[in-house]
Amino acid sequence: MNDTRKYLPQALVIEKDIVNTPLYKIIRAKFKNCEIEVVDRASTRNDVKSGKRNILILARQRGPFLRMCPGTKRHICCLYYNLDIAQGCNLSCSYCILQGYIENSQVTFYCNLDDMYKELDLKLENSRRFYRIGTGELSDSLTFDEITQYGPGLVSYFADKSNAILELKTKSCEIKNLRDLKHNRRTVVSWSLNSEIIAAREESHAPTIKERLLAAKEIQSYGYRLGFHFDPMIYYDDWESDYRRVVDMLFSTIRPENIAWISLGALRYPIAFDQVIRDNYPDTDIVRGELLPGIDLKMRYFQPLRIALFSSMYKWIESYSKDVFVYLCMESDAVWRKAFGWSPGRNAVLAKLLDDRVKN
Amino acid sequence: MQKCAINSTFCRIPVSLVDMDDKFFSFRRTLDEKLPESIKKVGILKPPRVQVFHNKYRIVSGFRRMAALVELKIEHVEAFCYDSTVASELLFPIAIFDNMSERPFNPLEVSEIIFKYQNQFRYSTDDVVKRVLPTLGYGQNPRVLSLMEPLRNLEHEWQNLVLLEKLSLETASIFARKDKQDRDAYFSLIHKLALGKNRQREFWHLLRDIAGNTNRKIAVILNEKPIKNLVGNNRLTSSQKADKIKAQLWQQRYPVYSKVKQKFDKILSDSRLPAGVNIEAPLYFEGDVYTISLSFRSESEFGERVEFLRNLQKIGTVKKLVDVTNTEIWS
């Protein structure tokens, strides 16, 4: 990781409640010289409200840590659970949906991990269903792992769970904390991938695709299952050759039998988010694609373009292995059928197919 | 802005000594030109404010009143006079408050005030946002600054459209930053088509993206023959022209969608649907639910129309319609 990617907050805002937690002490030690302010509730602090940049908030998660992915109406959802352990990211991806939800790129780490583990115990011990749980919804799962050390604790926790699996979704190469852990293959480490040109243009603070795949190769050698998410795919003139190349790179680096799943999703965002991207990233051209309002009132590529993206990717991936499970993130039954020639039809069916990939 | 009481003297001054060309404190931009008439009738109700400056009087507040006096050839006026030593930065807020007591400022005046603070008084962007905008009744929001700031650069005719509220502030602000050729081409289009504010925004978004995707200037896009011909077509109403030009722009902005839509429309048109029968694709062809609407006045009419629809299926038209988004067709 080069210096520009290093996360250096200007100030720490700390909630009183968490100063006695072990995580606070670990993080505080990393930023000894940082300006610090202790507050009752970070959300009421003026700087935080006015969006001063580069503030790291160490807070108590007051709501539930575990939430089911809200999905999107009339689209097939994989019934995933998000573990909201952090909010915000330092990778500055132009399309990142967090821009619309989290104020001004502030990063929050939740430190009341005892509460989180209690909540997980309660959920998992009292349920007969299988849970796929990920930390990559409101943040990148690993980009801050050197600071937070969330990874080792979570991987160890899930190692002996029979009805749950952890997915750590990332674009980073922060994997050294995952080495030498007893994971029992109950953790899937996943990378978001894109074409190299899109990664360079739109994910400018994230490692290159080559770097990500090398990190994935390393993780493979630690015995973990792997996942890959081509999301958001971008439709542009050279998309076919560029995405094909990344599929080739992927399968020349990773053994198909170690891949739990590959998801595909095309660029999509709420209608009002269009202006947020244009304001924050005036040079990006992704918003000028043939994006039209979908039935869920999100902007999506015109359906035939999405089908072209997905069906080509499916074909290329299948050419390497028919056993790798490829699924679509938030797409309709119609798109599944047109792109893949089949559809799970319902959320529960897709969820079961994914569960079966990692249950044993 | 500094807050302190500034002493002035109330005195009678000769209008001839007022420097009418000195616009240092001027920021009013108005369409109302009826002041001489009212002064002629009732005199000056609110005395102007001036400052002694290089042996003349510099107007602080009351530019239109002074101009009216000159026009009416009135030789003397009673005014509040400030000493030459009073800093202009202290007098500018007086000019603002004095004018604001008459009516709220329009966006062009706000733009001018911002310009004066930035250029005459060297206020930083942050100073303007935090100190000036609240004085003018706005929140401390940098977006207000970026919206208002460029308006003063617009040509007079476009400024007038802003004052008449015929040009949306957002559109005016965006185009004030564009080069003159693009601005003139776009404003001329919206003026000729009498586009309302929502449509102005819609056209701007289409043009912005077409220009970005094709690396052409907006003026070049609007100067192309099909659009030019439509604008100049006297047999069409403004509204018809706007619809047709919008369709042209959609073809450029959404080429694949437009191609599919045209194909769908062509299949429907070739099938010669009878009156009372309509077939609609899902909005933007998203999803797979097509809709048929059918109206009828009698059992026999119902039978005819259902039979017509059955026949559409037999001859393969329905298949063609639902397959219209297949890649083989549009590629």
Image (cartoon, rainbow, N blue to C red):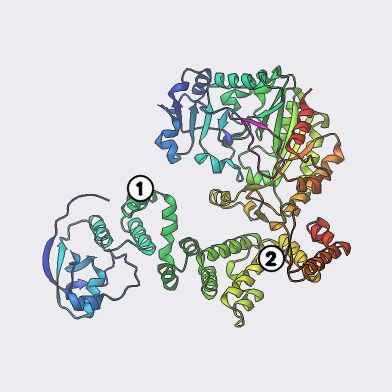
Q: Are marks 1 and 2 in contact (CB under 8 Å)?
A: no
On the image, the x and y values in percent for residue A15 come to: 45, 26
N-terminal label among 1 and 2: 1
Residue at 81 percent of width and 66 percent of height: B303
State the residue position of label 1: B130
On the image, the x and y values in percent for residue B154 come to: 44, 67
- Few, some or many residues within 10 Å of mark 2 (<14, 14–19, 20+): some
- Few, some or many residues within 10 Å of mark 1 (<14, 14–19, 20+): some
**A209 is higher (above) or lower (below) than B32:** above
> Would residue A124 be counted in the magenta stretch?
no
**A128 is higher (above) or lower (below) than B93:** above
Question: What span is in magenta?
Answer: A67-84
| Nearest to the observer: residue B153 or residue A276 | A276
Q: Spot the residue most to the bottom.
A: B234
- Badge 2: chain ID: B
Look at discs 1 and 2 and give the one toward the viewer: 2
> In the structure shown, which secondary structural element does the residue marked by tag 1 occupy?
helix
On the image, the x and y values in percent for residue B136 come to: 33, 55
| Nearest to the observer: residue B54 or residue A26 | A26
> Would residue A71 be counted in the magenta stretch?
yes
What is the spatial separation of the Cα atoms under label 1 and label 2, in whole angstroms?
Answer: 45 Å
Residue at 84 percent of width and 65 percent of height: B307
The image quarter containing residue B146 is: bottom left
State the residue position of label 2: B251
Task: Determine whether, in the image, residue B4 is placed left or right of residue A240.
Answer: left
The image quarter containing residue A231 is: top right
Quarter of the figure that contains the C terminus of chain A:
top right
Name the kind of residue labelled 1 in the image: Lys
Task: Determine whether, in the image, residue A356 is placed left or right of residue B120.
Answer: right
The image quarter containing residue B113 is: bottom left
Q: Which mark is residue A329?
A: none
Quarter of the figure that contains the N terminus of chain A:
top right
